Image (cartoon, rainbow, N blue to C red):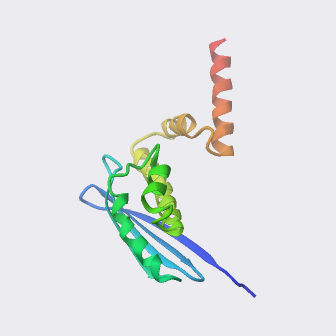
Amino acid sequence: MIIFNRTKSCSVDESEDGMLVARGTFIDTVHEICLTLHVSKDTLEIVKAKADMVRIPHPYCAEAQAEDRKLVGIKIGPGARKAVQNAVGHAHGCTHLADLALDMVKALVTTNYRIQQRGKSEEEITAQYVEELGGTCNHWTKRSEDHKKDQLSVAK
């Protein structure tokens, strides 16, 4: 018998006004939290955030919903993890809202890579990924190491 279950989901749409609209849901046995982030496609800055604590286990949890406004101004990129945690996590936030927001930041980073791929060749895309993603996962670390070996052998 399942005692506990959790599902998180994120999607990102591109709007015609130069915005990325990220929607996330966090649903488990005791919570249902929705978060929508509007992010400038040009600056990758969160310009609007709306949390909705649909189902919560305790009355005080509802207070954390108002912390969503603290996400506005955060730029997607280096330092975003700490900024999100400080904005909606910790003592007066909600660990689950912060968790969802962090997953959405990751989705937005991936979306930005997809946007940057437009009009580039496969070789250009791979070179960018090798440079930027080496050290982030086994695949890109190995590709980065292989690329560096290739560059050394060409230089000799």
The answer to whether residue 127 is above or below residue 136 is above
User: Position of 18 compared to 151: left or right?
Assistant: left
The quadrant where residue 23 appears? bottom left
Q: Quadrant of the N terminus?
A: bottom right
Q: Residue furthest right?
A: 1
Q: Residue furthest left?
A: 17
Q: Looking at the image, which is closer to me, 149 or 74?
A: 74
Picture coordinates of residue 15, whole percent (x, y):
29, 62
Picture coordinates of residue 16, whole percent (x, y):
26, 60
Q: Measuring 51% from the left and 82% from the top, which residue is drawn there?
A: 58
The answer to whether residue 8 is above or below residue 15 is below
Q: Quadrant of the C terminus?
A: top right
User: Position of 48 compared to 124: left or right?
Assistant: left
The answer to whether residue 12 is above or below residue 82 is below
Q: Measuring 34% from the left and 51% from the top, which residue is drawn there?
A: 45
Q: Measuring 64% from the left and 17% from the top, which residue is drawn there?
A: 154
Q: Looking at the image, which is closer to me, 147 or 40?
A: 40
